[in-house]
Amino acid sequence: MCLGLGACTSLLPSSSAVSPSQFGSYEAARQALEKSVPYQTTLEELKALGFDPYASVNVTVIPYPEVVSRLAPYSGVPLEALDRGVRDCILAQTRCSAYVFHIARNDRQRDGNFILDFLNFRRNVQQTGWTFDGMVVVRDGVVLFRNVAGAPNINTTEKTVNPLGPFQRAGESSGDLVLH
């Protein structure tokens, strides 16, 4: 029975964190945001593309003073050197605001030997997914600037080895007690 459980990775936990959105991938979100055209796309058209600043989840509304610090962080850069949309936003002051849309998918899957994982000797966690951050700068209901950031392809492996297995944490806890 122990040998059967040792090979059974389906008993290991897995998790998934998804930001609800209509986009199934980084690329789909990027392509949708790039359909917006500075100085042409209205806020209503932006909503139709799937980027509604007040109905979408995980949206950060950035007020004008913070827009300046994000888009023009160095006062030594002349205004003329900035992107036209950023420059016009700075000149519009409080009539300008920005929105950052954060969309993500993160899957975590533990794999390896069930017994070693269960007894805390060895744990392997595979993390895959993507994150998308799209910033849109709007003045008077018209998009002035847009920018895309994020991680299109996340693939990491976390390996933990505890030679003392289930006693490892007890040793760490007692060490904390001695130090404090």
Image (cartoon, rainbow, N blue to C red):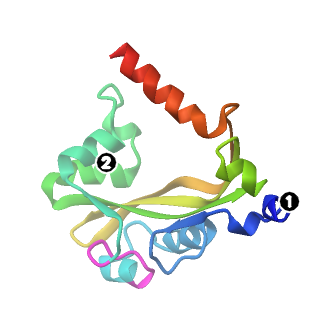
Q: Identify which residue, 78 or 52, lies in the foreground.
A: 52
Residue in the picture at 16% in, 51% down: 93
Query: Magenta span covers which residues?
Result: 48-55
Q: Amino acid at mark 2?
A: Arg
Q: Residue at 80% x, 58% y: name it.
A: 6
Extreme residue toward the top, this view: 179
- Percent of width and height locating residue 156: 68, 48
The residue wearing badge 1 is: 3
* 97 lies left or right of 116: left
Residue 49, quarter of the rendered image = bottom left
Residue marked by disc 2: 87
Q: Main secondary structure of the magenta part?
A: loop
Q: Is residue 134 visible?
A: yes
Q: Quadrant of the C terminus?
A: top left
First in sequence: mark 1 vs mark 2: 1
In the rendered structure, does residue 178 fall within the stretch colored magenta? no
Residue 161 lies, in percent from the top left, at 70, 36
Q: Quadrant of residue 60?
A: bottom left
